[in-house]
């Protein structure tokens, strides 16, 4: 089955370039040049993933994504020239799976799309009593209660849970959550998300099962783990 990508971009040249490249690589694309056009397209067709510009003629893409809860309904990648740490975190908090900065490297964008779609189809992962449903993007505590996570926190946890007993570097985790631009984004973005994730995952006096591996990065602490297809 061919995956459908909704590309929301107000610059005609960029829109045509991205859609043409994706079509050549086997995707079906839908075009929208504004937030209002995006709403109309979504009424007619449900895409597998949305590529959303932030600076749209009729609104801020990050605010619109949060209002429409796009990240809960589809894969969501922000594609924008805004590249500060604050912008990246705002995009992830608004439900983005990834954040790609302009000028866009088309091959990198294709890899990001494939990664988001692949993560959305992974199985349920159980570790240390926690249950992580990657498809539904839900995390359940050992007592069965749902724990709300932002998109950035979820993406980092999926990366850690998918690679048991392996320490992941800050650079790797930063690549998981955003298209890193070393001029404006640093490993502190990952550190901040890990700190928030640890606070949320403290449960009944037990620390979160995320450990710091000195000189490397982060990993899930050893414990029981299983994968259900």
Image: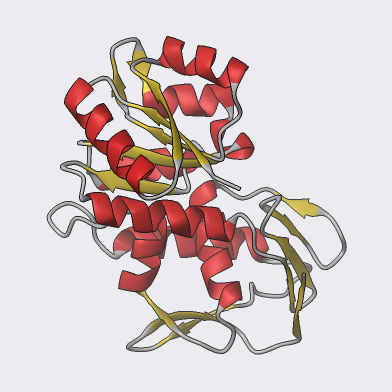
Q: Quadrant of residue 197?
A: bottom right
Q: Residue at x 26, y 55 (%)?
A: 107
Q: Residue at x 80, y 75 (%)?
A: 129
Residue 141 place in picture, x, y as percent? 78, 62
Q: Residue at x 56, y 60 (%)?
A: 119
Using residue 105 as the reference point, say whether residue 67 is left or right of it. Answer: right
Whether residue 179 appears in this view of the structure is: no
Assign the C terminus to one quadrant of the image.
bottom right
Q: Quadrant of residue 127?
A: bottom right
* Vertical relation: 223 (above or below) 106: below
Residue 137 place in picture, x, y as percent? 66, 52
Residue 19 place in picture, x, y as percent? 32, 35
Q: Nearer the viewer, residue 190 or 151?
A: 151
* Vertical relation: 154 (above or below) 61: below
Q: Residue furthest right?
A: 143
Q: Residue furthest left?
A: 183
Whether residue 130 appears in this view of the structure is: yes
């Amino acid at each position: 089955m061919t995956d459908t990508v909704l590309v929301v971009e107000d610059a005609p040249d960029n829109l045509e370039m991205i859609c043409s490249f994706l079509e050549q690589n086997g995707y079906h694309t839908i075009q929208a040049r504004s937030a209002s056009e995006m709403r109309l397209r979504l009424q007619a067709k449900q895409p597998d993933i949305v590529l959303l510009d932030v600076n749209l003629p009729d609104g801020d893409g990050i605010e619109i994504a949060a209002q429409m809860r796009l990240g809960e309904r589809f894969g969501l990648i922000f594609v924008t020239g805004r590249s500060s740490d604050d912008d990246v975190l705002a995009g992830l908090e608004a439900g983005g799976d990834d954040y790609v900065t302009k000028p866009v490297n088309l091959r990198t964008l294709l890899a990001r799309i494939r990664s988001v779609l692949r993560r959305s189809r992974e199985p349920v992962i159980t570790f240390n009593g926690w249950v992580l449903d990657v498809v539904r993007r839900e995390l359940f505590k050992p007592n069965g209660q749902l724990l709300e996570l932002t998109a950035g926190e979820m993406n980092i946890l999926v990366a850690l849970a998918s690679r048991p007993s392996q320490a992941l570097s800050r650079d790797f985790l930063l690549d998981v959550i955003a298209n890193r631009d070393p001029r404006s984004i640093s490993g502190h973005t990952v550190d901040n998300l890990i700190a928030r994730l640890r606070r949320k995952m403290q449960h009944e006096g037990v620390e979160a099962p995320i450990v710091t591996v000195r000189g490397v990065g982060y990993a899930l602490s050893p414990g029981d783990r299983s994968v259900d297809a």
